[in-house]
Amino acid sequence: MNRSMHLSLRAGERIFINGAVLRVDRKVTIELLNDATFLLENHVLQVEEAATPLRQLYFVAQAMLIDPSSSDKARTMFRDLQTATRQSFENENILSGLASVSELIEAGRTFDALKILRSLFSTENDVLTGGATKAPTQAA
């Protein structure tokens, strides 16, 4: 059974669907009638925002969705970066999240992996600012 998904966009907002970038000129609701890989503009991390290990992982993972034609390269880069990131953190929440993210990426569920990474940003911030378990021991 196919489920449709309704997405509401504001005027001028962009959405990335299966590698295509769409911008709407007015408030609109889009109904996706089949499976599609998409990112809403407010979930897209800009390169200058990828300043921490988890945000760098997020940036590489989002590249898999935004540019499917180069997802194999991005997946390889993601694996390498994730290995370095796992080795640099001791925080159990982050390590557990990274294990889940790895499984999701390998299963082709990149969007779900991005949701987990986003949920870890505040914990990472706490770690990096000394508010939680030990900060990374090396740059990822």
Image: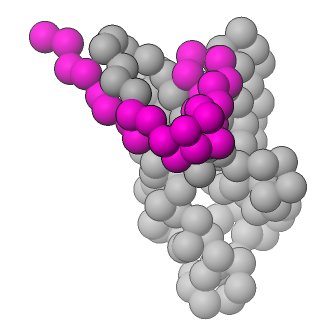
Which region is colored magenta?
Answer: 1-29
Looking at the image, which residue sits at the far bottom?
Answer: 131
| Residue 60 shown in magenta | no
Count every numbered label the image shows and give the total.
Answer: 0
Residue drawn 59% across the image and 51% down it = 42
* Residue lying at 71% horizontally and 78% vertically, measured from the top left: 128
Q: Quadrant of residue 28?
A: top left
The quadrant of the picture occupied by the N terminus is top left
Is 47 positioned to the left or the right of 28 in the image? Answer: right
Image location of residue 79, percent across then percent down? 67, 33
- Residue farthest to the left, as pictured: 1
Inspect the magenta stretch and tell me whether residue 7 lies in it: yes
The foreground one among 108 and 98 is: 108
Instruction: Please give left or right for residue 32 compared with residue 37 in the image.
Output: left
Residue 82, image quadrant: top right
The residue that appears at 53% across and 56% down in the rendered structure is: 118
In the rendered image, the vertical position of residue 122 relative to residue 49, given as above or below: below
Q: How far from the left and from the top, in percent, is residue 106?
A: 50, 24
The answer to which of 135 and 20 lies nearer the viewer is: 20
Residue 44 visible (yes or no): yes
The reply to whether residue 64 is visible in this rendering is no
Q: Is residue 34 above or below residue 16?
A: above
Image position, residue 139 (x, y; %)? 84, 61
**Residue in the picture at 61% in, 70% down:** 124
What is the quadrant of the C terminus in the image? Answer: bottom right
Q: Position of residue 68 (x, y in %)?
A: 65, 15
Is 137 drawn above or below residue 55 in the view shown? below
Chosen colour scheme: one colour
